[in-house]
Image (cartoon, grey):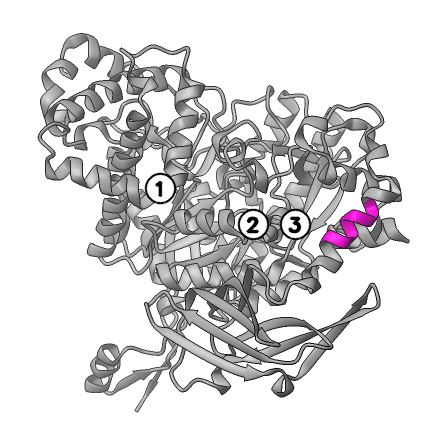
Amino acid sequence: MGLEKLLYLQGVGAEFIDCFGNHVHISPNDRKGILTSMCLAAHQSDVDGALSVLNDKFIEQRIHELDVAPWLKPIGAFQWTYVDEPYVELCLTEHFVGYIRLHLFSEQNESFRFQIHSSQLTAIGDYKTNDCLYIKYHFLLNEHQNNAIGLGYHQLTCSLDSDNHVTEYLCQLMLAPRQAYSGSLSEPLSSVRYHQQATTGNFSLSKKANLWGISTQLYSIKSESQWGVGDFNDLQKLIVFSAEQGADFILLNPLHALDLPSHISPYSPDDRRRLNPLYIHIESVKEYDSVKHVLSTPDWQMNKHKLFDNSLLDYAEVYALKQRVFCLLFDTFIEENQSALTDRFQAFSDFKKQHEQALQQYADWQVGHHKEDSCQGTFSNPDFWCYLQFVATSQLSLCQLTAKSVGMSIGLIRDMAVGASPTGSEVQQNADYFCANANIGAPPDPFAPQGQNWGLAPMDPIKLQQLNFLHFKDLIRSNMQSCGGLRIDHVMGLLRLWWWPKNLSLGDGAYVYYPLDALLAILSLESQRAQCIVIGEDLGIVPPEIVQNLSNANIFSNELFYFSKQNDGFTSPEHYKRQSLMMLANHDVPTLSAWWHGNDIELRQQLNLINHQQQQEMLNERDHEKHQLIHLFCQKGILLFEGDINRIEFDEVLRAWLQLSASGNSSLYSVQLEDLICETMPVNIPGTWKEYPNWRRRLSMSLEHITTSDAIKQRLSVINHSRVTDAQFDQ
């Protein structure tokens, strides 16, 4: 009985519904193994007989800590409530008689004082332990205060005055909105636009034209000005070009700092709060003018240009070359600015103060991580790593400013990975928040019989709450900088994540549940403050209990064309979810050209991921899906064709595909840059590592050719035209 209660308190799940709707029960041994992983100290991960940690004494102590102790303190260290119904939760003994005084000091430097006698409180719950009854109360602040208390993280002092004895307790009270920011996506027709239509006698409903954009893996972009990897200058050029075609946003891969050059997946980051310095555009750095004469020499330029023609990104060469340049730039920065205390150096100092602990953690970690490297001692200076973040942050900020200045409604949409590398700076420098004895992934299913282990460290939901969600707040806040939207990878992680124990003797894993309501409240507050829309990547096994919560919080769903199907084929566009981003394809599925021609199936066979029989079965199924797609085109009047569908020119199929999917009901729509240029090779094949060079493919067409291509402009014109869906009626 005690073990089962502790499993519940720790959030270890007992059952779930799989991708086929089957009810799956998680075995008691697997649940106990995950509980053991959670309760073991990090240094105990390899101890023999690890299950012995869950003895009766430990279970009793842990239950007391999680279930009983919160009742013994009158007010918790962190509380949250919605701003339109603010309250404070108090726990008092049944015999308490006296006054409760609350002093709230808001983020806006406003002071609010409340006083109430215990006899005026209304009980909402109770708990009895050691023959003592504790009563839980909600004290509604708006019933005792005329002035509204605004959004934010406020400091609260609670004083209990009983028998002339005063005891004080401190609490952070978060007042959150009920929904995330949605900007123009939920706003009525603007007065300017209404006036324009009124003067012509034509009125439209308050439904806006749907927004669309281009998604891209920034590192994969190839241009003549870069140093072997796509950078923020390329992003600026793509922004301007896309806006000219009518796009409202650019959806990016995660820009997180990586443990380069060995760990290159943007979804396995070193630190999600920091940017990857490889995206810095060297010629745009202020110090470049002072070192231009060095970098313009034949040797440097030869090293730069030989990287241009590579079809695969050579991270080792690019990293080595750009790090050498960064050393030159930093040394010049120090020489020209530090002793003179220039405005630029002051801006750098302000940047370090603004980012404080998280930036210092990253810099210190990098110094230790590169202690064997040599760059004239530069790598051993924490300010070198801070400088790279200073430059990268300013260049990314300029990209978002450019996007807004050229008329994009949203601008950049960033992507945040679901976890971080267990050996990286984020986890190692914030070990109190993470479980060192487990990795996150996905449970076994028919597509991956062994399950998926992503090798990422999970945040511990208990530690997260006990530490007042500080790391989660910092994580969200940093990823909402310099953008108009944030896509959260595997958003189901706000509710639950599948944990794999690192100790193989501890079983095959289980779901671990997180405080969804609190995480959504923090996400909504940070979203409103940053004026940043939120998109939740909810592909895969989506538990029904999270769907409505995300919708209520105004978080956009993320649909993928390939997976949007009904019994008779692909979903008709009028049935797309309104509150969603429809992606025609993404980094985990074949490109459109590869899908149509079956190149992805052939590649899987070449890599020995499937056998000949499986290949034939997949080709037959693909042929069936292609006929369903063409049938939908014809049904919607987009394409008129009879006969062998393989005789249709792919460009014609692509244009029909773009028109169909872009005309859908979703508020947001995106197409990959890879699909606009008809790439056939994937950027990533899930489940592969040694078999395929994931995350290294560069685009086969340069950015210069993309932005001058009439064919690509025509394809984007199809999208832009299809996204104008305002219903018109005459006055």
Residue extending furthest toward the right: 1
Task: Work out whether mark 2 precedes mark 1 in sequence or the reverse, and give the earlier one.
Answer: 1
User: What residue range appears in magenta?
Assistant: 59-65
Please indicate, yes or no, whether residue 375 appears anywhere in the rendered image: yes
The image's mark for residue 462 is 3
Vertical comparison of 402 with 262: above or below? below
Instruction: Please provide percent x and percent y for residue 190.
Output: 28, 77
Query: How far apart are the two marked residues, 2 and 1, measured between alpha carbons?
Result: 18 Å
- Return the residue at label 1: 356
Q: Residue at x 53, y 67 (%)?
A: 553
Task: Work out whether mark 1 precedes mark 3 in sequence or the reverse, and give the earlier one.
Answer: 1
Foreground pick, 505 / 336: 336
Residue extending furthest toward the front: 164
Q: Which residue is drawn at 22% across and 49% down?
A: 402
Foreground pick, 595 / 301: 301
- Return the residue at label 2: 467
Dot 2 falls on a residue whose secondary structure is loop
Please indicate, yes or no, whether residue 698 appears anywhere in the rendered image: no
Residue type at tag 3: Ile
Foreground pick, 23 / 597: 23
The answer to which quarter of the image holds residue 191 is bottom left
Specify the quadrant that holds the C terminus.
bottom left
Instruction: Please provide percent x and percent y for residue 513.
Output: 69, 52
